[in-house]
Amino acid sequence: MEKLRYHKKLSLLHLKQIINLRVVCSYLMRFILFFLIFIANTDLVLSKEYASEIFYKIRTETISEAKSIGSYSKGCLSGAEYLPNHSLHYEALKPSRNRFWGHPNLINYIKNISKEVFEIHGNGLILGDLSMPRGGPMPYGHKSHQTGLDVDIYFEKKPDLTMERYELETFKTRSVLSPNQREINENIWSDYHYNLLKIAASDEMVTRVFVNPLIKKKMCIRAGEIDDTDWLKKIRPWAGHYKHFHVRLRCPTDSELCINQAEVNNSSGCGSELDYWMQKDKLFESNSTKIRKWMLLSDLPKSCKKIAME
């Protein structure tokens, strides 16, 4: 009889434990289900949001190792370095854009060539955009500049004095083309601009320097006069680019997911290629400001999603 009572008590205890366990499991399953739904909804929101809007909202860099990922027009950047504000050798326009981040290779390149230009010509550089804190597509202004390896440099010389914040936001740069945009403005162009482009292109990390086709033609004529054409292959014609030139570095050796643009050929580029650009309908305006808004996070390399979420 006592054994029977003992077994009954034991069975009731087990039953209570089983019920409690089921309750706990029920809550646990609900939590797991809720968590999965939350993650799925987050991914769904991210997957439907334009990549440019996602990366634009991120104001800080990742703390991971510096890596350029993907291609120049479809990629991102981890471990970006910020270009310091105000320098004797350069000033960067429109700081409110927060586009002065780059791979350390680009930051070092800017510091080095701006110092060289200052030492030779006595003035510093005025810079445009680099990349956003984690690279990626921008909501306006560029299709490239996504991997921290591109920078715009203006033909305008840096003023002698340190520029105030409002000056950096409102400073107007000049075109080196004539008002009719059919020739170089000889009242502005000088040997300084020729030397500036040569210094910019001479670094071994540089793969291309984009300039207006009329500027390329001017460079070809001058280089031919002084027999100095070996380096001209890096100077590439592209629509627009009459107030600034665009420097592009090759992928860093330790960025295994970075995709290089094909190497330029060994010709000076002063022949048929230049003739082709001189005949293009849109010689003086670039379509780079027409951003591919439809690019989603899922269109970028897989690593870019992790970088956007860090």
Image (tube, rainbow, N blue to C red):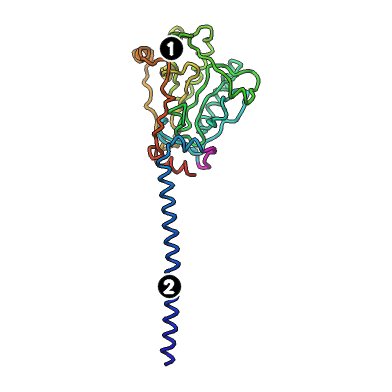
Residue 135, horizontal then vertical, whole percent: 48, 34
Residue 32 lies in what quarter of the image? Answer: bottom left
Sort mark 1 into few (<14), some (14-19) or many (20+) by Cα contacts within 10 Å: many
Residue 120, horizontal then vertical, whole percent: 58, 16
Residue 8 lies in what quarter of the image? Answer: bottom left
User: Which element type, helix, strand or loop, lies under badge 1?
Assistant: helix
* Residue at x 52% of width, y 21% of height: 153
* Residue at x 43% of width, y 66% of height: 25
Report the quarter where the N terminus lies: bottom left
Marks 1 and 2 in Cβ contact (< 8 Å): no
Residue 237 lies in what quarter of the image? Answer: top left
* Residue at x 44% of width, y 62% of height: 28
Numbered disc in front, either 1 or 2? 2
In magenta, the rendered stretch is 58-64
Asked if 18 appears above or below 162 in the picture, the reply is below
Left-right relation of 191 to 233: right
What residue type is disc 2 on? Ile
Residue 19's disc is 2
Q: Which residue is mark 1?
A: 214
Residue 115, horizontal then vertical, whole percent: 58, 22
Q: Residue furthest right?
A: 161
